[in-house]
Image (cartoon, grey):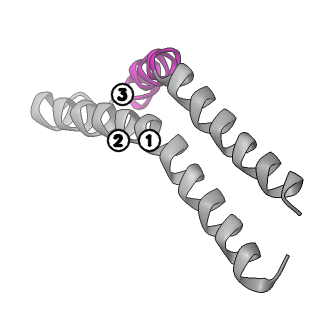
């Protein structure tokens, strides 16, 4: 492998990492902002109020997006295996 191919694999791996993390982080961000807004509007300053809904939402998002994540990882593995076999 030359330097360009190594950089190409690294770029693909970083893009895959972004694609895998983005849905879960977006759900966590949305729930966190909405709970923070709720706390600011109602003046409820309970610290543990944020964690339970966020954990449930992230778990539900993982269940929802897990097939997509598996397909992305499987496709990347097939691409890497094809590059190895092509050497």
Name the residue carrying label 1. 25
Q: What residue sits 45% from the left and 15% below the top? A: 60
Q: Secondary structure at mark 1?
A: helix
Position of residue 75 relative to residue 70, above or below, is below
Q: Which residues are magenta?
A: 47-64
Q: CA distance from mark 1 to mark 3?
A: 23 Å
Between 55 and 87, the one nearer to me in the picture = 87
Name the residue carrying label 3. 46
Q: What residue sits 36% from the left and 33% below the top? A: 27
Q: CA distance from mark 2 to mark 1?
A: 6 Å
Disc 3 or 2, which lies upstream in sequence?
Answer: 2
List x then y, in percent, for residue 3: 77, 84
Name the residue carrying label 2. 29
Between 9 and 23, the one nearer to me in the picture = 9
Q: Is residue 51 left or right of residue 4?
A: left
Q: Quadrant of the N terminus?
A: bottom right
Position of residue 17 relative to residue 3, above or below, is above
């Amino acid at each position: 492998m030359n330097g360009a191919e190594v950089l190409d694999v690294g770029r693909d791996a970083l893009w895959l990492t972004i694609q895998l993390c983005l849905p879960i982080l977006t759900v966590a961000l949305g729930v966190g902002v909405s709970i923070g807004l709720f706390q600011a509007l109602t003046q409820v300053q309970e610290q543990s109020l944020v964690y339970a809904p966020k954990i449930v939402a992230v778990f539900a998002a993982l269940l929802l997006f897990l097939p997509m994540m598996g397909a992305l990882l499987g496709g990347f593995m097939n691409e890497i295996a094809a590059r190895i076999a092509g050497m």
